[in-house]
Image (spheres, grey):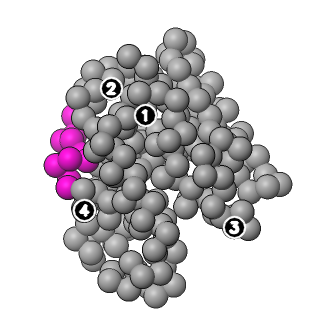
Amino acid sequence: MSKGFVILAVDKTDSNVYLNCANALQASLLNVMPNANVTIITTNDLPEGDLAPDSDWKLINDWQVYDASPYEYTIKLEADMVIPYNIDYWWDILKDRDIVVSSTIRNYKGIISDSKYYRSFIVDNKLPDVYNAITYFKKSDGAKLFYSLVREFFENWDQVRKELKCNIDEPATTDWVYALACHVHGVENTTIPAF
């Protein structure tokens, strides 16, 4: 079974901010799981290339992680985090699913947070409360469909946002797009209960 962690580090041309974060995340993973497979995907690794070459915000490229991942089973991590302990057991929990987007976050004390202070769009639009920062997928029809939805929402955001309760100038973010894709694909198909 080919499995590994993928970290997106898609920076603007003259910056290495996300690449530096990705390198720190990779080091944290290998510190607690020395045998883990970790791949950092940069702008040069995107199968379709950088779809926002003149933008500082490269979120529109996120859907490309599906094709860019060299693994059959992938846990995608956002670059700006660290993994302080071994999470190898996640593979056993996730392996039978096509895609799982995290739906529970915990504070530094391990207590589940349900704050929507920065996420009122979830409540306003009755969307699933998901966090793309940690997303598992296996190469499958279900995951491929999910990432095609992510792509479609990003590429058609000007039209999509007209159907949502949001600011008319609201930018497409991975938070918005993953929540919409989970809603369309089915929460039961894209999340698991907190453990």
Q: Quadrant of residue 88?
A: top left
Magenta-highlighted residues: 186-195
- The residue mark sitting in front, 1 or 4, is 4
113 w.r.t. 123: above or below: above
The residue where tag 1 is placed is: 75
Distance from the alpha carbon under mark 4 to that under mark 2: 25 Å
Main SS, magenta region, reads loop
Residue occupying the point 24% across, 56% down: 185
What's the residue type where badge 1 is placed? Ile
185 w.r.t. 107: above or below: below
- The residue mark sitting in front, 2 or 1, is 1
Q: Does residue 192 belong to the magenta stretch?
A: yes
Residue 55: numbered disc: 3
x, y percent for residue 64: 52, 49
Which quarter of the image is occupied by the N terminus?
Answer: top left
Kindly check if marks 2 and 1 are in contact, taking CB atoms under 8 A apart as contact.
yes
Distance from the alpha carbon under mark 3 to that under mark 4: 28 Å
Q: Tell me which numbered mark, 2 or 1, is placed earlier along the sequence.
A: 1
Callout 2 environment at 10 Å: few (<14), some (14 to 19), or many (20+)?
few
Q: Tell me which numbered mark, 4 or 2, is placed earlier along the sequence.
A: 2
Q: Tell me which numbered mark, 3 or 4, is placed earlier along the sequence.
A: 3
x, y percent for residue 59: 56, 59
Q: Nearer the viewer, residue 80 or 175?
A: 175
140 w.r.t. 148: above or below: above
Residue occupying the point 51% across, 84% down: 169
x, y percent for residue 119: 37, 67
Residue 184: numbered disc: 4
